């Protein structure tokens, strides 16, 4: 299916062309309002920072998650590859996010996650929902939760489950 130029997503679009074609009327208008930061009632949109800390160079999964969250009406900031813990924490502070979603496939989570969680605490962002996705061995999950991660999402997780989890924990305001 080829979309005409007018049907392609714009910078203020809340979703991809496919998602936009599925959504219509009031639902699309509500999503567009979310993409602009506020709903008609003045309620705040959920803001999520998707970050790729460390030397991991694989970001396809992070981009899939970012797109799914955006399609669900959340405002998403993607940091790009090779971020330091300090850069992630600073971006979370500057962007005033409610959620930090880390994607780590390199095995560096035991070092990176506690550092990021500590920096968020130092910045007064202890209430930010910290999520971790990627390759995390089962034996490491408990230590990630102890470090401040709310939930670990492994490969193959349905993106709708991630959206629901965020909406339930942060609320839709």
Image (tube, rainbow, N blue to C red):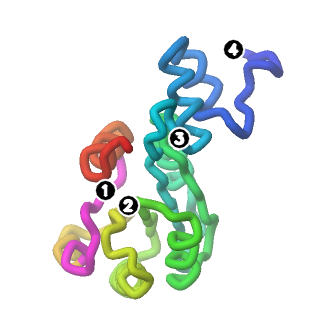
Distance between mark 3 and mark 2 Cα atoms = 28 Å
Residue interval drawn in magenta: 144-157
Upstream in the sequence, badge 1 or badge 2? 2
Residue 149 pos. (x, y %): 28, 70
Distance between mark 4 and mark 3 Cα atoms = 32 Å
Q: In this view, does 2 lie above or below 64?
A: above
Distance between mark 1 and mark 2 Cα atoms = 5 Å
Residue 131 pos. (x, y %): 34, 63
Q: Determine which of the numbered discs, if any, sits on residue 153 in the image.
A: 1
Upstream in the sequence, badge 2 or badge 4? 4
- At numbered mark 2, what does the secondary structure look like: helix, strand or loop? strand
Res 144 quadrant in image = bottom left
- At numbered mark 3, what does the secondary structure look like: helix, strand or loop? loop
Res 142 quadrant in image = bottom left
The residue at the point 36 percent across, 53 percent down is: 155
Upstream in the sequence, badge 4 or badge 3? 4
Q: Determine which of the numbered discs, if any, sits on residue 38 in the image.
A: 3
Quadrant showing the C terminus: top left
Q: Is residue 95 above or below residue 142?
A: above
Residue 42 pos. (x, y %): 48, 39
Residue 96 pos. (x, y %): 51, 64
Of residue 26 and residue 139, the one placed in the foreground of this image is 26
- At numbered mark 4, what does the secondary structure look like: helix, strand or loop? loop
Distance between mark 4 and mark 1 Cα atoms = 32 Å
* Direction front: furthest residue: 41
Asked whether disc 1 touches disc 2, contact meaning CB atoms under 8 Å apart, the reply is yes
The residue at the point 82 percent across, 21 percent down is: 5
Residue picked out by circle 2: 133
């Amino acid at each position: 299916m080829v979309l005409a130029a007018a049907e392609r997503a714009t910078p203020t679009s809340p979703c991809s062309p496919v998602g936009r074609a599925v959504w219509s009327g009031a639902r699309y208008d509500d999503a567009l309002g979310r993409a602009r930061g506020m709903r008609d009632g003045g309620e705040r949109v959920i803001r999520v920072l998707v970050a790729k800390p460390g030397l991991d160079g694989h970001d396809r999964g992070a981009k899939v998650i970012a797109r799914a969250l955006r399609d669900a009406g959340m405002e998403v900031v993607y940091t790009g590859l090779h971020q330091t813990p300090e850069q992630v924490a600073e971006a979370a502070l500057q962007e005033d996010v409610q959620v930090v979603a880390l994607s780590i496939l390199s095995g560096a989570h035991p070092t990176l996650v506690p550092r990021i969680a500590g920096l968020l605490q130092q910045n007064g962002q202890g209430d930010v929902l910290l999520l971790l996705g990627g390759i995390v061995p089962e034996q490491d999950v408990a230590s990630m939760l102890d470090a401040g991660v709310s939930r670990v999402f492994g490969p193959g997780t349905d993106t709708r489950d991630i959206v629901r989890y965020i909406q339930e924990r942060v609320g839709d305001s």
